[in-house]
Image (spheres, grey):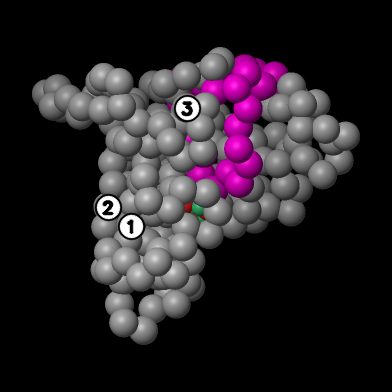
């Protein structure tokens, strides 16, 4: 059984979707740890409820990003995870970590990449005036929301949408797409060829 560790900074609804998929048996894996940079993250409560051990590395208490990331790297190594899932982890990950776990980190982003990378993706979509929005599960590389795309899902942008209503519609798709991408990884069904990720057929 594959070992998944999750990084989350806040509410943790995507983390919950991973836990729920494991419990439902659609994601055959064990969630071995939640790592958070935020001691107030609601994700911690979700982990406690699900019996998932938690590591809190309070970013604000570190004198520098370098020192924080050294501890983060050590904590991640300590997980002995096959896969790291970034579920609303709100920091750019440094190169020492992206190198150490290349091909083994998945992020969920609330936009149809490569459009609207970075923060406030849903607001960017509204401001730009696109008619279709969505989410992307992708492998993490050294850039910001730039790694090879595993799965995407789209939703319409409705006439009266604001950032919040669009974010809610996208979030429902995130909760489907992130566990599905993790499941494909765990089933060994992702073949990465440069920027392209081919999804291999399920084995019987
Ligand atoms: C999600 O929209 C995620 O895509 C973005 O931040 C939000 C986190 O939500 N990066 P949650 O913490 O998973 O509820």
Evaluate whether residue 169 shows in this view: yes
- Give the residue number, with chain letter if any, for mark 2: 153
| C-beta proximity under 8 Å, tags 2 and 1 | yes
> Which residue carries the number 3 mark?
141
Which corner quadrant of the image does residue 59 belong to? top right
181 in the magenta segment: no
Label 1, ligand 1: CB separation under 8 Å: no
Residue 28 appears in the figure: no
Please tell me which of labels 2 and 3 falls first in the chain.
3
45 and 185: which one is in front? Answer: 185
Which portion, as a residue range, is magenta? 73-98
Determine the secondary structure under disc 2. Answer: strand
Residue 73 sits in quarter: top right
Judging by the rendered image, the residue that carries numbered circle 1 is: 134
Q: Position of residue 46 (x, y in %)?
A: 59, 51
How far apart marks 3 and 1 lie (CA) works out to 21 Å
Front residue of 53/60: it is: 60
């Amino acid at each position: 059984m594959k070992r998944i560790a999750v990084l989350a900074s806040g509410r943790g609804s995507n983390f919950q979707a991973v836990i729920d998929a494991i419990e439902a048996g659609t994601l055959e894996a064990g969630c071995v740890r939640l790592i958070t940079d935020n001691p107030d993250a609601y994700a911690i409560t979700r982990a406690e409820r699900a019996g998932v051990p938690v590591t809190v590395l309070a970013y604000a208490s570190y004198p520098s990003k370098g020192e924080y990331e050294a501890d983060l790297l050590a904590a991640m190594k300590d997980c002995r995870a096959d896969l790291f899932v970034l579920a609303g982890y709100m920091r750019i990950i440094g190169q020492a970590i992206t190198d150490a776990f290349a091909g083994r980190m998945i992020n969920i982003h609330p936009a149809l990449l490569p459009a609207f990378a970075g923060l406030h993706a849903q607001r960017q979509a509204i401001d730009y005036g696109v008619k279709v929005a969505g989410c992307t599960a992708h492998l993490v590389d050294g850039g910001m929301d730039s790694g090879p795309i595993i799965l995407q899902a789209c939703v319409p942008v409705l006439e009266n949408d604001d950032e919040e209503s669009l974010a809610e519609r996208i979030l429902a798709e995130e909760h489907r797409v992130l566990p599905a991408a993790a499941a494909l990884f765990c089933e060994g069904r992702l073949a990465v060829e440069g920027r392209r990720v081919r999804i291999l057929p399920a084995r019987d």
